[in-house]
Image (cartoon, rainbow, N blue to C red):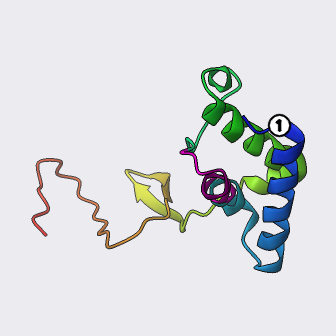
Amino acid sequence: MINTEDLERIVRDIDDKFNLSNVAIPRRVINCIAEVSKILKVSLPILATKENSKESDAYMITYLISEWYENMYGNRLRINIDIGFLIILLRGELLVCRIPNFFGTCKFFIEEDLSYECLD
């Protein structure tokens, strides 16, 4: 396995390139994992916890990358990319619905009759 200092240097260099390319902070962890995977010529999981980081070198590398970004950027890694919210008046009560970010086409419909089937 690569030693921690060398991995940190690689991650720092990659993050410097992300800065120059204006890569959004929340996207950097996953992109960095992909870049490190290419550099080291190993397959890396996209998620690793402290517990499973002991299972293999690959999990440890992903965990260390994630920790580096957590220490570097903290809450700036967590950004809400939802489209927004929809407020519906339902039987005299306001219902707030979160609309997540999605790719492709999505149709929303509201029908009181729950037996209704949307065919399109």
Say which of 109 and 101 sits in front.
101
Q: Is residue 93 left or right of residue 80?
A: left
Q: Secondary structure at mark 1?
A: loop
Image spot of residue 18 (x, y percent): 77, 70
Residue 54 placement, left or right of 112: right
The vertical placement of 116 against 64, above or below, is: below
Residue name at image x 59 percent, y 39 percent: 47
- Decide which of 115, 103 is in the foreground and name it: 103
Q: Which residues are magenta?
A: 32-43
Q: Is 3 placed above or below 77 here? A: above
Q: Is residue 52 magenta?
A: no
Q: Which residue is mark 1?
A: 3
Position of residue 89 measured from the top left corner of the image (x, y, whole percent) = 43, 59
The quadrant of the rendering that contains the C terminus is bottom left
**Quarter that holds the N terminus:** top right
Across and down, in percent, residue 46 comes to: 57, 45
Residue 36 lies in the magenta-colored region? yes
